[in-house]
Amino acid sequence: MDLQITTPAIFFPTASLLMLAYTNRFLGLSSRVRDLHTHWQATHEAGLARQIALLRRRIVLIRNMQFSGVLSLLLGMCSMLAISLDAPPTALWLFVGATIALMLSLVIALNEIRLSGNALDVLLSEMEK
């Protein structure tokens, strides 16, 4: 396979938009944690334990999504460098690594979206009581 320098460059707009989306999810989650903490300080409500557990899992997932996305960008840049240094086999393996890292980031994002829905279900079920 003849890898051109423009091929790894396709990761930059994709990964940049994903990182923006991931950061927005993280900011929304951190805001929710702060609100929940304020609510807990005022009420010491025991029913918040399930929400806290879901928030903890989501924070870990978002951190892993961001890590995989940044790793994808980094490997893509290294692939471009390897192409520039006329090292096609290295460039190809780095590009494959970047692709796998981006796919991993998306799979983790799917799981986080599922957990986000579960968190909303917890809130709705509490309001139904």
Image (spheres, helix red, strand yellow):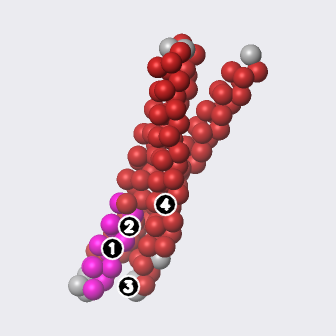
Query: SS of the residue at dot 4?
Result: helix
The amino acid pointed to by label 3 is Ile
Are circles 1 and 3 on residues that touch, CB within 8 Å?
no
Give me the C-alpha separation between circle 1 and circle 3. Answer: 10 Å
Labels 3, 4: front one: 4
Q: Are marks 3 and 2 in contact (CB under 8 Å)?
A: no
Q: Which mark is residue 20?
A: 4
**Point 52% across, 49% down: residue:** 25
Q: Disc 3 to disc 2, how far (Cα)?
A: 14 Å
Q: Which of marks 3 and 2 is in front?
A: 2
**As rendered, which of 98 and 26 lies closer to the eye?**
26
Q: In which quarter of the image is residue 8?
A: bottom left
- Amino acid under label 4? Leu
Q: Residue at x 58, y 48 (%)?
A: 110
To which residue does mark 3 refer?
5
Dot in front, 4 or 1: 4
* Rendered position, 75 above or below 80: above
Q: Residues within 10 Å of mark 3 (few under 14, many from 20)?
A: some
Q: Is residue 97 shown in magenta?
A: no
Q: Do the residues labelled 4 and 1 touch (CB within 8 Å)?
A: no
